[in-house]
Image (cartoon, helix red, strand yellow):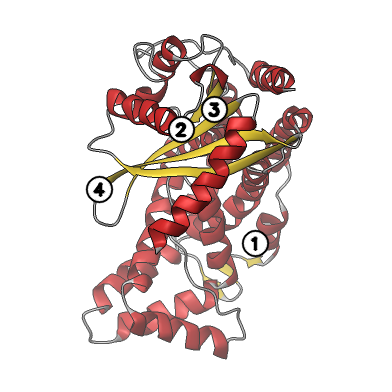
Amino acid sequence: MHQAIASALVEDVDKAVLKSPVFSLVLDESTDISNMKRLITYVRYMDDNKIRMKLFRNSEIVDGRADTIFEDMKQLLAENNLDGKKLAAACTDGAAVMTGCRQGVKNLREEFNSDLVGVHCTAHRLALVASDAARSVQQVKKFQQDLRSIFVFFSNSAVRSNKLYELQKQLDEPQLKFTQPHTVRWLLVHSAVSVVCRSLKSLRDVLEHMAASNTQDSDKAKGLLTSVRQFNFVALAHLMKDVLMHVSLLSKHFQRENLDFSTVQPMVEGTKEALREIMVHPGPAEEEFFSSLQGNKFKGDRLFEFNTQKPAFDDMKNRWSTGKIQNYKRKTKERTDQGREEPRDKTLDDGCFQINKTMAFAK
């Protein structure tokens, strides 16, 4: 039954793509819960003078090698009677198997269309910017590790989660679930940080209660309690809430279905300016944190290592925010080293120009 429904949906997409003057493919490799390699393919095409995007295929592949992915794409086009010369662009996550100078997009150009545009997904590139900036600062790396540990601690036990929810209810805090932060998916990190900031009191109290118990959770709870009581943890939670708000807004803008490319560069410049402003003037979350400090106490709870971590935090803040801006400038330029080809969209401006040119050709 499922296969019949899927076949009917794909058939409708096939007809629309066949009528389109050009089309492009969006590819991403993944692994399912049974540990099998999958290649997910979306297609973008013109329909009634509008750009549409639909799931085209979710295929199982034997491995993630470039030649395997290339053969799967050739098979996809052949099975659906699609003219490879109309393939105008291919968007990927920027992995070498997709964009390499001896494989990936180069093979597509040689096989189908010499004018094909290879696009490194801008939202993914932005996530790499944030990830690289975080790895360059030790305090932020430690904060990420603590976030992941908190998620694992509560997600692995319904009893722990229920204790937290009950305490949040008693303290009149929002009953929020800790989400899993991801080193690349920074929208999830922003969500996780926001939950921590809004549930900090209940988080500390439930960890303190578990740490004092004689259960198997006590040692883990003690370690997490020590971390969340550090000045760095609380200060970074509020700083990252401000910083990642701007990064998340930019990422969501990149992922809009009908993106106006004329807005991309202003959005990028606006985000960089917002990060520069945070370096000089605290954002709303960080300002709320520092205004609530009374000596070494935040809302009545003592913060550990205040005298040593506060000066280091001020220095780290400048280096991390600066790193984001510098990394974005670097990441918006693809490199020719490490076996990667030099793409046509060397800068964000050039990338927008190439995509606009492709859309003009489609008309």
Seen in the image, is 22 located left or right of residue 124?
right
- The residue indicated by pointer 1 is 289
> Are the residues tagged 4 and 3 within 8 Å (C-beta)?
no
Residue drawn 42% across the image and 85% down it: 162
Q: Nearer the viewer, residue 181 or 64?
A: 64
Residue drawn 43% across the image and 11% down it: 341
Q: Nearer the viewer, residue 311 or 66?
A: 66
Q: Earlier in the sequence, mark 3 or mark 2?
A: 2
Q: CA distance from mark 3 to mark 2?
A: 17 Å
| Kind of residue at badge 3 | Asn
> Are the residues tagged 4 and 1 within 8 Å (C-beta)?
no
| Kind of residue at badge 4 | Met
> Where residue 213 sits: x, y (%)?
28, 87
Q: Earlier in the sequence, mark 1 or mark 3?
A: 1
**Looking at the image, residue 191 lies above or below residue 275:** below
Residue drawn 54% across the image and 27% down it: 327
- The residue indicated by pointer 3 is 327
**Looking at the image, residue 178 lies above or below residue 49:** below
Front position among marks 3 and 2: 2
Q: Nearer the viewer, residue 289 or 351?
A: 351
Front position among marks 4 and 1: 4
- The residue indicated by pointer 4 is 36
> Where residue 175 sits: x, y (%)?
56, 80
Seen in the image, is 225 located left or right of residue 88?
left
Q: Residues within 10 Å of mark 1 (few under 14, many from 20)?
A: many
Q: Earlier in the sequence, mark 2 or mark 4?
A: 4
Q: Earlier in the sequence, mark 4 or mark 3?
A: 4
- The residue indicated by pointer 2 is 93
Q: Residues within 10 Å of mark 3 (few under 14, many from 20)?
A: some
Q: Residues within 10 Å of mark 4 (few under 14, many from 20)?
A: few
> Where residue 210 sits: x, y (%)?
33, 82
